[in-house]
Image: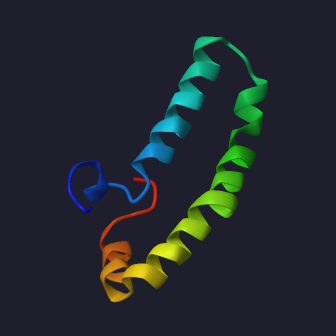
Amino acid sequence: MTGGAYRLSRNPMYTGLAVTYLGLALLFGSWWPLILWPLVIVAVRQLVIRPEERYLTQRFGQTYTDYQSRVRRWL
């Protein structure tokens, strides 16, 4: 799938969740989620995105590698 949101981001769901997380922290005026946000992003990247991308590279090979070179991970 390379159309729609996937032509702008390889992980539109995680990008949307990261933006929502920041927005809610700002809306509620809470500072500690803002401090933890970089750790959350690193955790998602290491624990979720990297394994997914390894699987997709194994499953789809050069097709997925080409997609990775055209589309950024976040935005």
Observer-nearest residue: 13 or 72? 13
Residue displayed at 73% across by 29% down: 33
Q: Is residue 55 above or below residue 31?
A: below
Percent across and percent down for residue 47 are 69, 60
Q: Residue 24 falls in which quadrant of the image?
A: top right
Percent x, y for residue 1? 26, 62
Colour setting: rainbow
The residue sitting at 70% across, 31% down in the picture is 34
Position of residue 8 measured from the top left corner of the image (x, y, whole percent): 30, 55
Q: Residue furthest top?
A: 28
Location of residue 62 (image quadrant): bottom left
Farthest residue to the bottom: give it. 62
Residue occupying the far left of the picture: 3
Which residue lies most toward the front here? 59
Q: Is residue 49 above or below residue 62?
A: above
Total number of numbered labels?
0
Lateral position of residue 46 relative to residue 56, left or right: right
Q: Residue 28: image x %, image y %? A: 64, 11
Instruction: Please state if 32 lies on the left or on the right of 38 as rendered.
Output: right
Left or right, residue 41 beside residue 75? right
Tell whether 17 sits left or right of 28.
left
- Residue drawn at the location 64% of the way across and 21% of the way down: 25
**In this rendering, is residue 42 above or below 28?**
below
Which residue corresponds to the image point at 39% horizontal and 63% vertical from the top-left?
72
Q: Nearer the viewer, residue 55 or 8?
A: 55
